[in-house]
Amino acid sequence: MTLTDLSEGFRDDAQRRRVQAVIHDRLADDREQQECRYLMRLLWQLSMPYQEVSIEQLRMNVRKSKLEVVEELISAIRTSPNEVDAWIVITQQACPVIHDSGFAANSD
């Protein structure tokens, strides 16, 4: 399954940026570098018409709990902007903000 259609599924750029912020702040943990790398590729994929990451790569590199959230996002994008809004709310409630290792190192 290609993900090149994802950039077309948002109401506007503001909605896309909100989704990208949720991925960055709540899913992409730099302490899990391999997983983070692929989640960041997904984040970029949301703005790109070419393939940055495939669903197969995500399935191989993202742990199951986060992969389920990602698959829900993909489904929401392909369904409607209202479903994307719902995904944002649900994910913000379910996933805490991740404080990356750079943040932790600077807060001591």
Image (spheres, grey):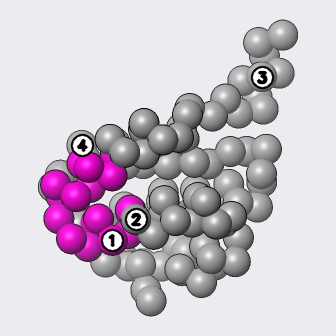
Residue at the disc numbered 2: 72
The one nearer the camera, 44 or 19, is 19
> What amino acid does circle 4 point to?
Ala
> Would you say 6 lies left or right of 26 here?
left
Q: Which residue: 57% across, 66% down?
A: 67
Image quadrant where residue 14 sits: top left
Of mark 4 and mark 2, the one earlier in the sequence is 4
Separation of residues labelled 4 and 2 (CA atoms): 20 Å
| Along the viewing direction, whichever of 50 and 107 lies nearer the viewer | 107
Q: Residue at x 54, y 80 (%)?
A: 54
Can residue 16 be seen? Answer: no
User: 62 above or below 12?
Assistant: below
| Callout 4 secondary element | helix
Q: Which residues are magenta?
A: 73-88
SS at mark 3?
A: helix
Which amino acid type is shown beneath numbered disc 1? Ser
How many marks can you see? 4
Whether tag 1 and tag 2 are in contact, CB under 8 A, the answer is: yes
Q: CA distance from mark 1 to mark 4?
A: 19 Å
Assign a secondary structure to mark 2.
helix
Q: Main secondary structure of the magenta part?
A: helix
Q: In the image, is 27 to the left or to the right of 71? A: right
Tell me if mark 2 has few (under 14), some (14-19) or many (20+) residues whose alpha carbon lies within 10 angstroms of its own: some
Q: Amino acid at mark 3?
A: Ala
Is residue 64 shown left or right of residue 4?
right
Circle on res. 14: 4
User: Residue drawn at (38%, 62%), measured in percent from left and top?
Assistant: 73
Residue wearing tag 1: 75
Mark 4 or 2, closer to the camera: 2
For disc 4, the neighbor class at 10 Å (few under 14, some 14 to 19, many from 20) is: few
